[in-house]
Amino acid sequence: MTEVKIHCGDCAGWLEKAPTGCFHLSFLDPPFNQGKDYRRFDDKRDAAEYWQWMTGILAGVRRATAEGGWIYFMQREKNAEFVLRALRESGWNFQNLVVWKKKTSAVPCAGKFGLHYQIIAAAANGKSPRVFNRLRISPPPQPGHKIPRENGVYVTDVWDDIRELTSGYYAGDEALRAEGGERFHKQQAPLALLARIILSSSRPGDLVFDPFAGTGTTLIAAALLGREGIGVEIDPENVKCIRKRAAEKRKADAAAMEKLREYYAHTENLRAVWGDSFARARQQSGKTENKPEKRLLVA
Ligand SMILES: C[S@@+](CC[C@H](N)C(=O)[O-])C[C@H]1O[C@@H](n2cnc3c(N)ncnc32)[C@H](O)[C@@H]1O
């Protein structure tokens, strides 16, 4: 596992000092401005103000992203229009609108269909992405299909095979708990989601950035996959949690990631994409100098 770097503070201010062109991939899972209870954040702002803020952050991330680097921006489905506009206005080149279909029941709505997915808009900095690994998965046969596919299938833009972390039984050991047993952070994303993004859109050794780090899922996934992870989080309690999560090298995190290896087994060149030989080589050589995150630490 490579090292995890986390900065406590406001990502907008931090991004102003980040070197140009250093990130290869960023994942943004900001508060969605829907009145959720955050200790250090007003999640009920004027919509125009919120989207102006988001567009500024997207522009800051793009300036700090290498040519062809990726961004994945997660949001509520009802914000699709604003997401695409904010990406365009901040200069990103749209690639995919991923539908992350939830495994839990849909949110019921009166007078319209119930809500069953979140969106993740993927875009590149420049004409074309610098890397895209076509992952193959081994999903169970669809109803009506009796024979499993021998070589798996390519991942598409509908992700219906990644379970969100819930408070109950299915959250398992991966969900971080506070002392009373309740979840430490209700928005903790599953490692499987970040693994898919990191494996498809970066190479081992790349620098992966998360400006709204929360519990550090992006950084932990990056580290377990032989990438460098750097994040910003405004809430000191969350920062403490990330540091502890990284230092503890939780078995549950490693196990969640290891479980995926079999699922992606039909991916061409999986060993190279996964990055464990890279992590091992770095560990053996003890080599850390001239890495971009070093410059970021002193910025
Ligand atoms: C939806 S959560 C991210 C959860 C994360 N993906 C995970 O898996 O744990 C959003 C996070 O952004 C943080 N945040 C809000 N405003 C911020 C800001 N201006 N700069 C940095 N972090 C911020 C919140 O404290 C919260 O932890």
Image: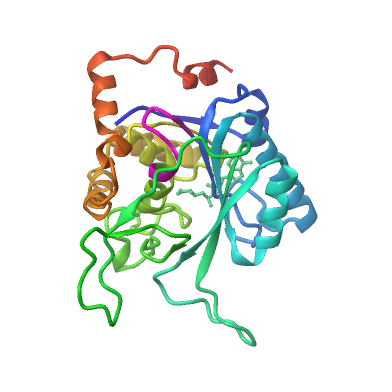
Of residues 293 and 154, the one drawn nearer to the viewer in this rendering: 154
**Quarter where residue 167 is shown:** bottom left
Looking at the image, residue 61 sits to the left or right of residue 1; the answer is right
Quarter of the rendering containing residue 150: bottom left
Q: Which quadrant of the figure contains the N terminus? A: top left
> From the viewer's perspective, is residue 147 above or below residue 44?
below
State the count of labels.
0
Q: Position of residue 111 (x, y in %)?
A: 64, 87
Q: How is the image coloured?
A: rainbow
Task: State whether residue 46 appears in this view.
Answer: no
Q: Is residue 229 above or below residue 160?
A: above
- Is residue 203 a member of the stretch shown in magenta? yes
Which residue corresponds to the image point at 72% horizontal and 40% vertical from the top-left?
56
Q: Position of residue 95 (x, y in %)?
A: 58, 50
Residue 16 image offset from top left, x and y in percent: 68, 27
Q: Quadrant of residue 3?
A: top left
Residue 293 seen? yes
Front residue of this view, candidates 36 and 4? 4
Which range is magenta?
Answer: 199-208
Which residue: 37% across, 15% down?
Answer: 288
Q: Residue furthest top?
A: 289
Give me the residue at 43% from left, 53% from top: 189
Residue 46 vs residue 214: left or right?
A: right
Residue 77 is a magenta residue: no
Q: Nearer the viewer, residue 65 or 6?
A: 65
Which quadrant holds the C terminus?
top right
Image: 193 above or below 226: below
